[in-house]
Image: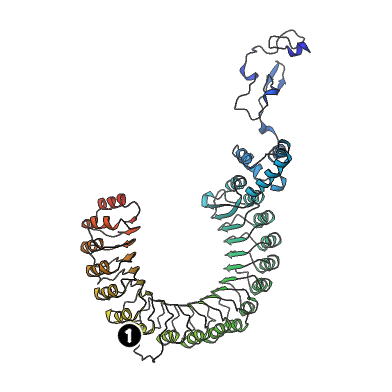
């Protein structure tokens, strides 16, 4: 034994009488090991050699080995015994092979023996609790788009976020044409991110049922699922989600050609907490799927959006009967729904809690059906109709009378609505109507009709009449008498109105206008703006005069002298000059934050001092198409107005 411990490189190890190595000082044969090796040996177990020997005819040959020679099974056992997320992340950065192995280890397969062997019992419990808090809450969000959406990135996300709060939200949008996301990438997320709550898959053709089923099997905390243009996903994947994700509350399916009624039936039966559904452009979805969802989630479903589906009156009847918890309803492009469907839905008396209702491009909306909806939804507050060609004045007035709780009414491209329907709505609305919007309704014509002596609509605060070419001074003057409490007024695109129709409105508004949009009102002059500044300058905060070619520096002078609260001013494409900008800059107590001068071709470099002074409060300055302003002036403004976004 004494000779064994006294062994040195000069001693004879073999009975042959000679040393083992011809050059005993070869550095690669001795410890200590350098930092380049893959494994660490404690100093108390030092060895004189760093690799085993291979016997050959010439003698001994050293063979360098690494942990990489171990099969995947052995590396798997090593990796699952790593003590924490930081250690796993560090190992994942070594190679793609290690990353792949680590990303395929589920939480159930992780071992805590390493921690337990080196910690006291009390510390082990504390450490275990801490790890659960860190890795289980789902703090992080990740979004991959286009070329960045690959399986390797998903594997890195799965390993990297596990020890730093856990992944809570994942969005994948677009395919990588060569290395797109597949089921392997989603498998890594499923095994490494059990805290995932929100998943969005958009325009991904390479992911099918297997990938989404992996998510369902591994992420039982999933609450929101958004699928858009995923043709490889079928009902089978939704069945897996229904079986494994009982906490699902929001489901959005758009342009998924292979998802149909069976998947929706499974969701309705397996997800009792479902609160919101949105289904769009799915040709296989019909009445059976919608009916199953609504009837199964009678007391939980609050938001329903159906767009461009092959459903019939049956679906609307089910909504009207089972939608007892529905507060928001959107129906768009349902060609197979008739007047009967809306009538039955309104008379189903199930939409007692409905507050917001939007109907777009539905030929079944008629006077009879709309009146039934108004009577069957007593708590309806917001109603929007778009492109409903068969609705007339009588139906609109009947609906307004029936919907006594209505606060906001929007009509867009409903061309059978005329001036009678518009004013009839104002005269017959309840005492709660606050906002009325009429957009692109070509049936409204400027008729000189006498309005009866009725009490004004004192509840109306916001009025928007946009792009209705037939709306002129006669209608506008009558409108001023009916709406004395207006605070927001949008008349953009009304080329037929002049000062004669606009001035009575200004004089009738008792509360004081706060937001005014007159963009495209080409026949308004400085007289209208000056009067508005005098009467409402003490309340006016936002004013848009874009395209009002008759507005000049006189309006800017009146605005500077009277509108102390104005923070957003748009005089794009107006006839203002450098003098008008200087007038704004000389105003006292002026707190302008957004100024748009786009298309004001007369404004030149002379406005630089004025713009510099205004820039002390500006956050946004639009100088696009101001051709008389040089690039050097723009550079000075960009440099000095560091708080302001300058568009040029």
Is residue 608 visible in the rendered structure shown here?
A: yes
- The residue depicted at 59 percent of the width and 61 percent of the height is 227
In the rendered image, which quarter contains the C terminus? Answer: bottom left
- Compared to residue 265, the image places residue 364 above or below, namely below
In the picture of the structure, the residue carrying the numbered disc 1 is 474
Please tell me in which quadrant of the rendered image residue 560 appears: bottom left
Is residue 496 visible in the rendered image? The answer is no
Q: Residue at x 55, y 48 (%)?
A: 178
SS assignment at label 1: helix
Position above or below: 526 against 97: below
**Residue 519 in the image, given as x and y percentages of width and height:** 33, 71
Q: Nearer the viewer, residue 57 or 452?
A: 452
Q: Find residue 421 and report its image quarter.
A: bottom left
Say if 248 sits above or below 44 in the image: below
Q: Residue 548 at what x, y percent from top left?
A: 28, 71
Mark 1 closeness class: few <14, some 14–19, many ≥20 residues within 10 Å? some
- Furthest residue toward top: 17
Which colouring convention does the figure follow? rainbow
Q: Quadrant of the N terminus?
A: top right
Please give the name of the residue rendered at 53% of the width and 55% of the height, measured from the top-left corner.
174
Left or right of 516: which side holds 613? left
The x, y position of residue 638, in whole percent, is: 31, 51
- Give the x, y percent position of residue 193: 64, 50
Q: Residue at x 66, y 28 (%)?
A: 40
């Amino acid at each position: 034994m004494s000779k064994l411990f006294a062994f040195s490189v000069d001693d004879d190890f073999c009975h042959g009488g000679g040393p083992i190595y011809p050059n005993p000082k070869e550095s690669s044969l001795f410890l200590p090991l350098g930092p380049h090796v893959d494994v660490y040996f404690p100093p108390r177990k030092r060895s004189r050699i760093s690799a085993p020997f291979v016997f050959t005819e010439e003698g001994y040959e050293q063979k360098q080995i690494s942990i990489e020679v171990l099969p995947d099974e052995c590396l798997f056992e090593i990796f699952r015994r790593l003590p924490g997320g930081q250690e796993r992340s560090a190992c994942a950065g070594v190679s793609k092979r290690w990353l792949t192995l680590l990303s395929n280890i589920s939480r159930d397969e992780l071992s805590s023996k390493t921690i337990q062997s080196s910690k006291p019992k009390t510390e082990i419990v504390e450490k275990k609790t801490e790890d659960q808090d860190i890795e289980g809450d789902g703090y992080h969000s990740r979004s991959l788009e286009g070329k960045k959406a690959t399986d390797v990135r998903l594997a890195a996300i799965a390993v990297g976020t596990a020890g730093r709060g856990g992944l809570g939200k994942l969005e994948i949008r677009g395919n990588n044409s060569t290395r797109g996301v597949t089921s392997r990438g989603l498998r890594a997320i499923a095994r490494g991110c059990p805290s995932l709550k929100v998943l969005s898959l958009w325009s991904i053709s390479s992911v099918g049922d297997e990938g989404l089923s992996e998510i369902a099997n591994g992420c039982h905390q999933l609450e929101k699922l958004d699928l858009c243009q995923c043709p490889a996903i079928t009902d089978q994947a939704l069945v897996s989600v229904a079986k494994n994700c009982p906490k699902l509350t929001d489901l959005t399916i758009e342009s998924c050609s292979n998802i149909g009624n069976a998947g929706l039936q499974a969701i309705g039966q397996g997800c009792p907490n479902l609160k919101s559904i949105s289904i769009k452009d799915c040709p296989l979805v019909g009445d059976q799927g919608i009916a199953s969802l609504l009837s199964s989630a009678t007391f939980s479903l609050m938001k329903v959006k159906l767009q461009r589906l092959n459903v019939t009156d049956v679906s609307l009847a089910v909504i009207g009967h089972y939608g007892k918890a529905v507060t928001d309803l959107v129906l768009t492009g349902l060609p197979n729904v008739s007047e009967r469907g809306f009538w039955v839905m309104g008379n189903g008396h199930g939409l007692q809690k409905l507050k917001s209702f939007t109907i777009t491009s539905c030929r079944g909306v008629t006077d009879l059906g709309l009146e039934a909806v108004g009577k069957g939804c007593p708590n309806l507050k917001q109603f929007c109709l778009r492109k409903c060609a068969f609705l007339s004045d009588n139906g609109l007035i009947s609906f307004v009378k029936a919907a006594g709780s209505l606060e906001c009414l929007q009509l867009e491209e409903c061309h059978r609505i005329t001036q009678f329907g518009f004013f009839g709505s104002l005269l017959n609305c309840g005492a709660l109507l606050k906002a009325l919007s009429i957009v692109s309704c070509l049936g409204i014509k400027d008729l000189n009709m006498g309005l009866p002596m009725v009490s004004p609509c004192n509840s109306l605060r916001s009025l928007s009449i946009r792009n209705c070419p037939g709306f002129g001074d006669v209608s506008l003057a009558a409108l001023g008498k009916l709406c004395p409490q207006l605070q927001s007024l949008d008349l953009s695109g009304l080329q037929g109105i002049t000062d004669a129709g606009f001035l009575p409105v200004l004089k009738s508004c008792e509360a004081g206008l706060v937001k005014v949009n007159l963009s495209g009102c080409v026949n308004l002059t400085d007289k209208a703006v000056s009067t508005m500044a005098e009467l409402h300058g003490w309340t006016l905060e936002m004013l848009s005069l874009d395209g009002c070619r008759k507005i000049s520096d006189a309006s800017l002078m009146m605005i500077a002298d009277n509108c102390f609260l104005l923070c957003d001013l748009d005089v794009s494409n107006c006839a203002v000059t450098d003098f008008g900008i200087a007038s704004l800059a000389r105003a006292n107590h002026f707190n302008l934050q957004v100024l748009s001068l786009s298309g004001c071709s007369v404004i030149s470099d002379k406005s630089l001092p004025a713009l510099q002074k205004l820039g002390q409060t500006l956050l946004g300055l639009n100088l696009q198409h101001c051709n008389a302003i040089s690039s050097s002036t723009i550079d000075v403004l960009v440099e000095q107005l560091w708080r302001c976004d300058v568009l040029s």
